Amino acid sequence: MNRAPYWYVAFQLFITDYKMARQFFFSKVIDISIWITCSLFVNAYLLPKFGIAPEFGMITFGGMLATAGIFEGYNSIITLVGDLSGDKITYYYATLPLPSWLMLSRMILSNAVLYTMLALSFLPFGKLLLWSTFDLSMVNWFHCVLIMIIANLFYGAFTLFTTSFIGGFYQMGSVWSRFIFP
């Protein structure tokens, strides 16, 4: 059996996801920039005045890089639950000539790429805010990018996993208390 059409359809769906994400990517970068500015101002500049180690801002920034995908994943869960409750575009995707494992893998990969791009987009912003505290020569870029990719692949899968437990919008509050916070 020729699997080439499967990969072509999956790739076209991935391109569609990319084009849709591109429409709101800049807005998400602005949202993340506000989050980073507020958090880093408190943790890197205000808390050291009260006796916290000056490196705490850098530790916080590392945590932000690691968890950016999970916060964006919450938005993806809302979007997917909304789709399953309303337009049901995901059901349409299930009718395409594509195995279900490949459709789900494509969704995970699309989310992971978006989350990774968002996390990488605020690296320069973090450098500007932390300036001398953030020494770029001390970063092992290979490990940093590898861990970000693996973490965001997990977050992409976690998004689908979590959505499978949510019955509708009335249960969205459970996402934080049952899944993301723990």
Image (cartoon, rainbow, N blue to C red):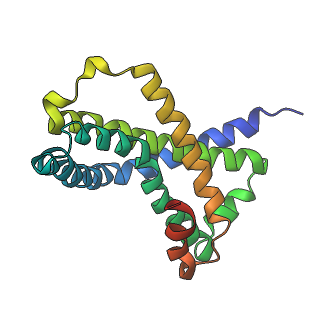
Q: Residue at x 40, y 39 (%)?
A: 117
Q: Residue furthest top?
A: 137
Q: Residue furthest front?
A: 51
Q: Residue at x 12, y 51 (%)?
A: 50
Residue 147 left/right relative to 108: left
Give residue 48's quadrant in the image.
top left
Between 149 and 67, the one nearer to me in the picture: 67
In the displayed structure, would residue 158 be above or below residue 135? Answer: below
- In the picture, the quarter occupied by the N terminus is top right
Residue 97 seen from this side? no
Residue 71 seen from this side? yes
In the displayed structure, would residue 118 be above or below residue 72? Answer: above
Q: x and y percent of residue 3 in the render?
A: 80, 34
Residue 114 left/right relative to 42: right
Between 10 and 64, the one nearer to me in the picture: 64
Q: Residue furthest left?
A: 49
Q: Residue at x 55, y 45 (%)?
A: 110
Q: x and y percent of residue 99 in the render?
A: 79, 47
Q: x and y percent of residue 130 in the render?
A: 17, 36
Q: Residue at x 45, y 62 (%)?
A: 75
Residue 162 left/right relative to 139: right
Q: x and y percent of residue 163 in the render?
A: 62, 64
